Image (tube, rainbow, N blue to C red):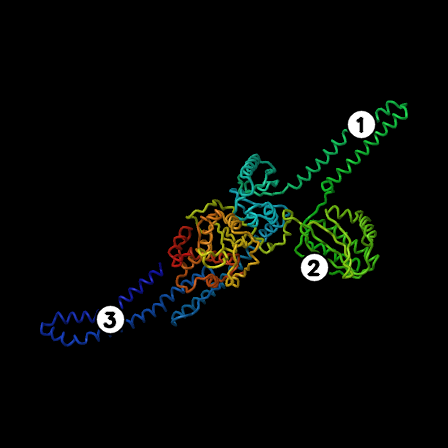
Amino acid sequence: MKDMNARVRFAISVIILGLLMTGPFLLTAWLVWISANPVEQDLLVRLLGPHLSLGTLMTATGFVVGLLVIRYLFRQYVQGLLKMVESLRLMLSANRNFRIMPDGPPEVCLLANAANDLAAQRDSLMDDVASQVATAKASVEEEKNRLAALMSELAQAVVVCNLDGVILLYNSRARLQFKALASGGTALASGALIGLGRSIFSILERNQIDHALTVVRQRLQKGAAASIANFITTARGGQLLRVQLVPVLSSAVDSDERQMTGYVLTVENITRSLEQETRRDQVLQSLTDGSRGSLANIRVAVGNLMDYPDIDGELRERFIGIISDEVLRMSQRLDQTMSEFADSLKTRWPLEDVLGMDIISAAQRRIEEQLGLTTKTDDIDDTLWLRAESFSLVFSICSLAYRLVEQYQIKELRFRLQPFGRLAYLDLIWAGHAMSSETFYTWENDSMQVGSETSPLTLREVIDRHGGEIWYDREKAAHRAFFRFVLPVATPENMGLGDASDDSHHRPEYYDFDLFHFRDQSIDLDRPLSELTYTVFDTETTGLEPAAGDEIIQIGAVRIVNGRLLRTENFNHLVNPERLLRPEGIPVHGITDDMVRGQPSIDVVLPAFHDFCGNTVLVAHNAAFDMRFLQLKEERTGVVFNQPVLDTLLLSGVLQPNQESHQLDNIAERLGISIEGRHSALGDATATGEVFLRMLPLLAQKNIVTLRQALEASEKSFFARVKY
């Protein structure tokens, strides 16, 4: 609107200039003309007529010069001041570090310098206030961070929801557990079942949670000491989950008036334990059924021997033979059962997920301190996690090192750790004397010892209880020998915060307690922009012509919930375009034919992306380009994206119409945002998300506060005319 008013003012200035240059001359000529008699009028025509063309030319020349002067002054002062206003709004709302570049007439430069000085003073005052506020809030923030750290570090899956089932908090165990349960498109979307602002009812049955809430409310009304509900449910993949629901109560002082504002769910996957219990029941049933007949025969034979002590020798031998045969049969049956169900009958040990490098480091410290033996590492995968009991495993390693030093006087022990499918190879390597298989067998079955410290366990028992193997081998070419521990790798459903991902850098994104007040999840056009959930996405393509056969080769997206960009809740997948890439595009996006070969096609990736961004507003930069690619795949995939779409390119045109460029790089620079991974789908999507969040307060200053207003303002932008 202000830009429109500026153009109107410029037009009025031009009209006034024309009137000032021609008005006095024409008015004077008209007054002279009406006051002269006919003879004088005729004389005036003869005198001035030949010179009218020159006068008109001079007037036109003066008008053009005046127009250029007005245009120059308008650009320097009016448009320059409007551009300065846009810059000031950036400093006030989006980018504190932004400063106005003094450009234009001296007066405008002085005003720019004064504005920069005011901004510097404002920043100093804000920093001082922020420091005082931070000091006052230090204890509160410390308690909040402790709670967040506690929830994130718990070994049990924890999910916190409000009464509408919106997820407010989840820890890494919950994310990994539900990721392991994901299937189909959800599995491709990195287990998108769980996320801040998503509904818990996409994971668990609403009816069961509602029933549990009813039970808890009844217990609260009765004043029960433990208002907790437990239930067992089945996940989509058929896994059995044990769920405990604990209410979150308001902070009212009077306990009688405390209301439930949400609930905490602790979730445990009990599928494996139930399977093991079922197998143990099968063992008992097999032993019971198989032994019943033999015991009956033995009982009859023993009874006859006792009832008839004077029975003849042949019959006595027959009864004794029956007893011997039945005992042998029972023994064979027991051996067969033990063989078939050995895994289910192993002693339970408290195995945990432990980083393999931590096992090696602990063993190295103990070997060097107690044995004085030098240790080194070769080919260590420091991201590999094991399912192990760390104390017994470290003691086993140290016991072998002790025997090697004692009997073979080795000088150095090396460690190697590498994955092999769902197993891990942990090697103890030494140079020097080889050993016989008989010696290794003896070491394997003797009680373990490290110096004066002994253990009643044998190496074989430790390995068996880990469900692993150990063997001895030689590297003849290198004149080295090694013991190889074959150990199970931690599976995703068992891994806690030990996951090898880099989520530890973004742990706070796992919770948002402000969402306790978050209610309706539907996309309401009249809802404030600050309350909506967004999916910010970007695509990389083989070219710039979607209608001419170019294809998507990568889709990246991040979510915005409650005004926060959730970097860890992202979607990032390569797509096989089923055609060769254009060579000129490879240096731009860095994706090659080898990288997309073997990747899923758009038929698989697009439904997964649709699940990821369900019930959210889509955001993109130059969204018309990306949406055109998605729309062209509707008929092939059956996936339709019908939610509202906001475009940061159009919004930039609305917010800063006087800026020369609205490319993502330039907008990010003005807003003080650095782009990591430019021209990668996820990198550009993340940058676009940060740009969009910085734009929200600028939109509010223009009274654009709802989704409907943002869409209507975008439609009036010049860039909205671009079609693909």
Disc 1 element: helix
Q: Is residue 372 above or below residue 292?
A: below
Q: CA distance from mark 2 to mark 3?
A: 88 Å
| Classed neighbour count for the residue bearing mark 2: other residues with Cα under 10 Å, few (<14), some (14–19), many (≥20) | few
Closer to the observer: label 1 or label 2? 1
Q: Earlier in the sequence, mark 1 or mark 3?
A: 3
Q: Considering the numbered disc 3 on the image, is that residue within a helix, a strand or a loop?
A: helix
Q: For the residues carrying marks 1 and 3, which lies nearer the camera in this image?
A: 1
Visible in this render: residue 368?
no
Rounded to the nearest whole Å, what is the CA distance between mark 1 and mark 2?
A: 62 Å
The image quadrant where one finds the N terminus is bottom left
Q: Position of residue 697 (x, y in %)?
A: 45, 56
For marks 1 and 2, the one nearer the N-term is 1
The amino acid type of the residue labelled 1 equals: Asn
Residue 31: x percent and y percent? Answer: 15, 70
Residue 276 found in image quarter: top right
Query: Residue at label 1?
Result: 297
Identify the residue under disc 2: 379
Q: Nearer the viewer, residue 261 or 481?
A: 481
Point out the residue furthest to the front here. Answer: 579
Judge from the rendering whether residue 637 lies leftward or rightward of residue 437; answer left or right: left
Q: Amino acid at mark 2?
A: Asp
How far apart are the two marked residues, 1 and 3, measured between alpha carbons? 132 Å
Report the residue marked by disc 3. 21
> Can you give x and y, in whole percent of width and height, for residue 12 in the image?
28, 64
